[in-house]
Image (spheres, rainbow, N blue to C red):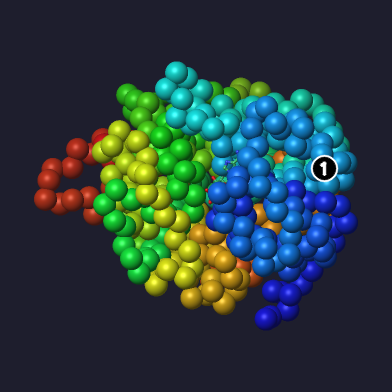
Amino acid sequence: MTASLERQWTHFSGRMLMIGFGCVAQGVLLLLLRHIAMRPGQITVLAPPECDYSVAESCGVRVDKLAVTRSNLSSILPERLEAGDFLLNLSVDVSCVDLMAWCQAHGVLYLDACTEPWTGGYLDASLPPEARTNHALRQAALALRDGKRGSPTAVITHGVNPGLVSHFVKQALVNLGRDLLPGISVPRDQQGWASLAQRLGIRAIHIAERDTQAPSQRKQVGEFVNTWSVEGLHGEACQPAELGWGSHERWLPACARLLDGANGAVWLNRPGGETRVRSWTPLEGSYHGFLITHSESLSIADYLTVRGSEGVSYRPTVLYAYYPCDDTVLSLHEAAGRNWHLQDRRRLLGADEIVSGMDELGVLLLGHARNAYWYGSRLTIEQTRKLCPFNNATSLQTAAGVLSGVVWAIENPNAGIVEPDDLPFRELMAIAGPYLGEMVGAYGDWTPLRDRCALFADDGRDDDPWQFVNMLLD
Ligand SMILES: NC(=O)c1ccc[n+]([C@@H]2O[C@H](COP(=O)([O-])OP(=O)(O)OC[C@H]3O[C@@H](n4cnc5c(N)ncnc54)[C@H](O)[C@@H]3O)[C@@H](O)[C@H]2O)c1
C-alpha cells in the first residue's frame, strides 16, 4: 500500500453510529478504520434485520438489527449517542432532516450523502410535485441553520455527487483560470468563486457521468440492476427533473417551473427518469443522459451566483446528466414502462460480479473561451479492487467523499450545517483523491448543437448552444 493509503488523517474517541448498511456504508467502513484512529468497538451499525452484515462482522464492529422509524427515532438515538459522538447516516427511507435536527439539539456530529425523506416521500402521489423536489428537501435541511453559529457540525450530502463534484468544480475553475486568466489567484470565499466563474464566462455546468461497469450476468427480464442503491435511484428517477437555472437562459420550456428566483431552482413537470439531456465526457464523447435531480445542481448554482443591489447578475445553469451502466439504463426503461412500479427482483452489482468497466464522473464547464472543459475521476473496477475490498467503482468514489467529509467534521466539530460547497476543496480532495483513480482535465469542442442527426432537419430551437432548451432532448 502507498503512504497515502495508510495515512491516518485524524483520531476519534467517541462512539460512531452508522445508520444503514448498504452499498455505500459497506464500502466506507474499511476506509474509516484505515484512515481514522479509532477501534472497531467504537462503531455500531444499525440497519433492518434483512441487511447483509457480513462486512460489519468481518471488521469486528457492533451490529444492531433495527429499522429507524418516525416513532422510534426519539428512543433509538438517545440510547446510543451523546454529545461528541458521530451519526453517519447512509440509509434510504429515513428522514435526514429529522436525524440532523436531533443531532443539532444533542451536540452530535452528523454526515449524510443525500437528503432522504421518510419512506415513500419520493413517491407520494398525494403531494404536489414541487413538494417532492430536492429544492424542498434542501430548504428544509438549510432551515435548521436558523441563524445559529458554532452548532455541532453537520455535513450534508457529501458523497461524490453530491459531494466531491463541488470540489471538482473549484479545481476546474482554478485550472481554467490558469489557462485563460494568467496571474489570477485562488478565490477565498463564495463571492470570489462566483466572480471567477463569471469572469471565465461559464454558462453551464454539467455533472457528466458515464458508468460502463458490466456484470457477468446481464440484467434479466423483470429485474432492476444498479451499481448503487436500487431503491435510491428509483426514488430519484421518480422525482421531478430539476436543475439550477442560469442567468443567461432566455426561455423556460413549457414543462418547467421556476421555483425560487432567488437561488435559481427549476423543476420540470415530469420524472427525471423520463427526461434526457445532451452531454459529453472525454471517453464516452457525446451522449444522452438522464436529467436526474440532485442537490448539487441546486447548491453549485446557488454558490456560484453573483448577487448585487439589483439582484442576481450571474449564475450558471447546473444539471446532472447521468448515463448509468447499460444494465441500469435497461432497468430504468423497463421501470418507466411499468409506470414506475419498481421491479420485484433487484440486484446491486458487487465488485465480484462486475467483469469490466469504469465510472467516468466529472464536471463539464461550458461556454468559456476554450468551449468545454471536463474535470473528474476515472476509476476502473480493476483499480477499485486493488484500492479497497467490498467496493465497486461507484461505491468507492462515494465512500471517498464520505471519508473526507467525516474527517473534516471530526477536525472541525463546531462548523454548523454545511454543504459541500462550503468546505475547503483542497483539504477534502487530498483525503479522497487516492481513491478516485485517474483525475483528468480535458478540453473538447462539443456543443449540444454539434453533430445533431444530419438525417433530419434540425429544429434549431436557439442558436446560442448554451441555452438549456438545446440540451433537453424532447
Ligand atoms: N452522494 C453520492 O455520491 C451518493 C452515491 C450513492 C448513494 N448515495 C446515497 O447514499 C445513501 C445510501 O446509498 P446506498 O447505495 O448505500 O443504498 P442501499 O440501498 O445500498 O442501502 C441503504 C441502506 O439503508 C437501510 N435502510 C432502509 N430503511 C432503513 C430504516 N428504516 N432504518 C435504517 N436503515 C434503513 C437498508 O437496509 C440499507 O442497508 C442513499 O441516500 C443514496 O442516495 C449518495
Q: Residue at x 60, y 47 (%)?
A: 49
Residue 54 in the image: above or below residue 85 = below
Q: Residues within 10 Å of mark 1 (few under 14, many from 20)?
A: many
* Residue ID for mark 1: 81
Viewer-closest of 24 and 455: 24
Disc 1 marks a residue whose amino acid type is Leu
Q: Residue furthest left?
A: 455
Image quarter of the N terminus: bottom right
Residue 5 in the image: above or below residue 421 = below
Where does residue 109 sit, x and y in percent of width and height?
79, 44
Viewer-closest of 21 and 294: 21
Q: Residue at x 37, y 40 (%)?
A: 342
Q: How many marks?
A: 1
Taking the image as shown, residue 135 lies to the left or right of residue 2, namely left
Where does residue 397 sit, x and y in percent of width and height?
56, 60
Secondary-structure class at tag 1: loop
Q: Residue at x 57, y 32 (%)?
A: 117
Q: Residue furthest bottom?
A: 1
Taking the image as shown, residue 227 lies to the left or right of residue 251, namely right
Image quarter of the C terminus: top left
Is residue 369 visible in the rendered image? The answer is no
Quarter residue 89 falls in: top right
Is residue 162 visible in the rendered image? The answer is yes
Residue 236 in the image: above or below residue 124 = below
Q: Residue at x 48, y 75 (%)?
A: 382
Residue 323 in the image: above or below residue 265 = below
Where does residue 358 sit, x and y in percent of width and height?
44, 67
